Image: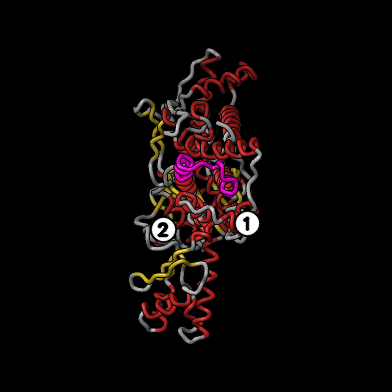
């Protein structure tokens, strides 16, 4: 890509400088090549002079002057400038930008993918919603964010494993069972006391109705586990169907109950106790988390004998390490912000490297309809489900809107905007760019106009309009953008990129004719159109959206 070509030029010049005694070979370590943030500072910039000056005890601008003189001999650069304390800014010849077209056509669907992750084993744990009700829009953001993170990591060459932590133990499952039993008894015409904090959604009635149809009055004296297990299985089947509907699959489901059945919970407590890191107080078992930087110790087993959520979470993470994952990524709602440090402290207490765990915390979603907030409450079941959201706006719009903000930013999801079939709607704006490019190619085929040859330098040199150069530069930046999004777990950057690329393309289309009287120019512009279509398609698919050919 262009940036790699620029770096090759710099490395060549640095090597020449070494041979001429300008700087030692060690001076070439750790410098960067980056795109300047401000317009007018060049297409690329390097801090080589600043980095090497410290090692040589020399003035950065003196080194920059020598490097700039060498770089000025490279035919790739139209201009080389020294800026600030010693940055060297590089301006690439306009004709060089069209060289990005060849790799786009050659790599096609693989354009943007890389081996940066070096097949490093990564687990992405996401969704992990308790099987106590349908997936709400909050779970939907988790699902889309986790899936997008997994997708960009895979594109960047990581060996990605997707896991759902199936939490079917603890108090919330007991409440689910009690809620289902109460509704079942009501349907059987029997007295039943609904739990004060029970689940009130209509889905509980549906589960109870199925139970009655299958087992009838025999349920009168059935143990709580019958109601709990039936509700759990029904709800989880519904969750899986929803996830499949929005194109999300998992490699494994980890059952929390197995942590108890296999003694992994007890083993954590025993190991912490052997290290002198737990103690008993007021009938509860406490973890000395203050020894690992926390402000106060934490209860891990209540006086009732029931573990707090921290304990199985610690055991689960130890199990992740045992499976050999080099990087473990958890996608959690912001309500986990207070508990994450406790779990990481537990991991460190077990002599495991907590630096291998990254937690992505996302803010919650506010739905707007007619400019007013849609009220939601999970316990009262007045929430909007993922299925209802997809029914209303479609999977593509849901995914796009969920990724339009950084994870730590709250989302105001405008339902009315998401349904608009106009360029006001950002997902429509981006997908319409792809459809418009497909339309141009169809028109070209109908007119018998074929794209030119990628090897025809004279033809490619016709792509010289400022808007064309802007599009070429944007496409050249795509592979590094994907690698950066994976490295920083920031799939929202792809959405920003696609919106910006769509803006550049729509402006170009409105100003310049692709198919005109000049056959050569039309052939050159068709090459540009084809490359743009591939980049849009790759970007949309990477975040789980469709790339429509007609709209």
| Classed neighbour count for the residue bearing mark 2: other residues with Cα under 10 Å, few (<14), some (14–19), many (≥20) | many
Whether residue 171 is visible: no
Instruction: Tell me the residue that label 1 is attached to.
Output: 456
Q: CA distance from mark 1 to mark 2?
A: 70 Å
Q: Residue at x 43, y 29 (%)?
A: 415
Q: Residue at x 48, y 87 (%)?
A: 21
In this picture, is 546 found above or below 360?
A: above
Stretch of the chain drawn in magenta: 502-530
Within the image, what quadrant is residue 187 found in? top right
Residue 198 x %, y %: 45, 27
On-image quarter of the N terminus:
bottom right
Q: Main secondary structure of the magenta part?
A: helix
Residue 422 x %, y %: 45, 31
Residue 540 x %, y %: 55, 42
Q: What is the number of the mark on residue 119? A: none
Q: Earlier in the sequence, mark 1 or mark 2?
A: 2
Q: Secondary structure at mark 2?
A: loop
Residue 395 x %, y %: 53, 33
Magenta-span inclusion, residue 362: no
| Classed neighbour count for the residue bearing mark 1: other residues with Cα under 10 Å, few (<14), some (14–19), many (≥20) | few
Instruction: Tell me the residue that label 2 is attached to.
Output: 288
Whether residue 519 is visible: yes
Foreground: disc 1 or disc 2: 1
Q: Residue at x 47, y 51 (%)?
A: 465
Within the image, what quadrant is residue 518 found in? top right
Magenta-span inclusion, residue 505: yes
In this picture, is 219 found above or below 522?
A: above
């Amino acid at each position: 890509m262009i940036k790699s070509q620029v770096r090759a030029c710099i490395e060549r010049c640095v090597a020449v400088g070494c041979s001429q005694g300008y700087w030692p070979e060690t001076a070439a370590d750790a410098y960067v090549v980056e795109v300047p943030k401000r317009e007018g500072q060049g297409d690329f910039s390097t801090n080589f002079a600043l980095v090497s000056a410290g090692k040589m005890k020399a003035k950065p601008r003196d080194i920059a002057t020598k490097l700039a003189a060498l770089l000025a001999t490279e035919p790739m650069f139209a201009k080389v400038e020294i800026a600030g304390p010693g940055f060297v800014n590089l301006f690439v010849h306009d004709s060089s930008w069209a060289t990005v077209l060849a790799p786009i056509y050659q790599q096609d669907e693989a354009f943007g993918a890389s081996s940066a992750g070096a097949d490093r084993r990564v687990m992405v744990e996401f969704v992990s919603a308790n099987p106590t009700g349908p997936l709400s829009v909050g779970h939907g953001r988790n699902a889309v964010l986790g899936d997008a993170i997994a997708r960009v990591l895979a594109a960047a060459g990581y060996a990605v494993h997707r896991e759902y932590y199936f939490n079917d133990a603890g108090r919330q499952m007991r409440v689910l069972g009690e809620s289902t039993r109460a509704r079942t008894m009501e349907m059987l015409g029997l007295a039943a006391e609904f739990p004060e904090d029970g689940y009130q959604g209509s889905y509980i009635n549906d589960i109870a109705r199925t139970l009655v149809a299958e087992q009838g009055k025999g349920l009168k004296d059935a143990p709580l586990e019958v109601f709990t297990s039936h509700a759990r299985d029904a709800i989880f089947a519904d969750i899986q169907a929803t996830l499949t509907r929005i194109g999300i699959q998992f490699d494994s489901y980890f059952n929390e109950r197995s942590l108890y059945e296999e003694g992994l919970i007890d083993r954590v407590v025993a190991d912490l106790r052997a290290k002198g890191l737990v103690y008993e107080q007021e009938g509860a078992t406490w973890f000395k988390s203050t020894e690992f930087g926390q402000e106060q110790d934490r209860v891990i087993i209540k006086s009732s004998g029931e573990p707090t959520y921290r304990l199985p979470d610690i055991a689960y993470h130890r199990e992740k390490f045992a499976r050999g994952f080099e990087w473990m990524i958890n996608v959690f709602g912001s309500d986990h912000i207070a508990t994450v440090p406790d779990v990481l402290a537990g991991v460190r207490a077990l002599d495991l490297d907590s630096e291998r765990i990254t937690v992505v915390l996302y803010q919650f979603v506010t739905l707007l309809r007619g400019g007013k907030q849609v009220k939601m409450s999970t316990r009262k079941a007045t929430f909007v489900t993922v299925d209802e959201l997809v029914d209303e706006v479609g999977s593509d719009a849901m995914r796009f809107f969920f990724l339009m903000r950084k994870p730590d930013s709250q989302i105001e999801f405008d339902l009315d905007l998401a349904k608009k079939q106009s360029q006001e709607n950002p997902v429509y704006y981006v997908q319409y760019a792809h459809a418009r490019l497909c339309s141009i190619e169809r028109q070209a085929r109908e007119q018998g106009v074929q794209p030119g040859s990628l090897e025809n330098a004279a033809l490619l040199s016709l792509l010289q309009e400022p808007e064309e150069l802007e599009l070429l530069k944007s496409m050249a930046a795509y592979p590094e953008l994907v690698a950066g999004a994976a490295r920083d777990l920031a799939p929202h950057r792809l959405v920003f990129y696609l919106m910006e690329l769509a803006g550049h393309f729509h402006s170009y289309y409105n100003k310049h004719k692709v198919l005109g009287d000049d056959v050569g120019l039309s052939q050159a512009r068709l090459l540009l159109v084809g490359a743009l279509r591939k980049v849009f398609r790759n970007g949309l698919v990477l975040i789980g959206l469709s790339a429509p050919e007609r709209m």
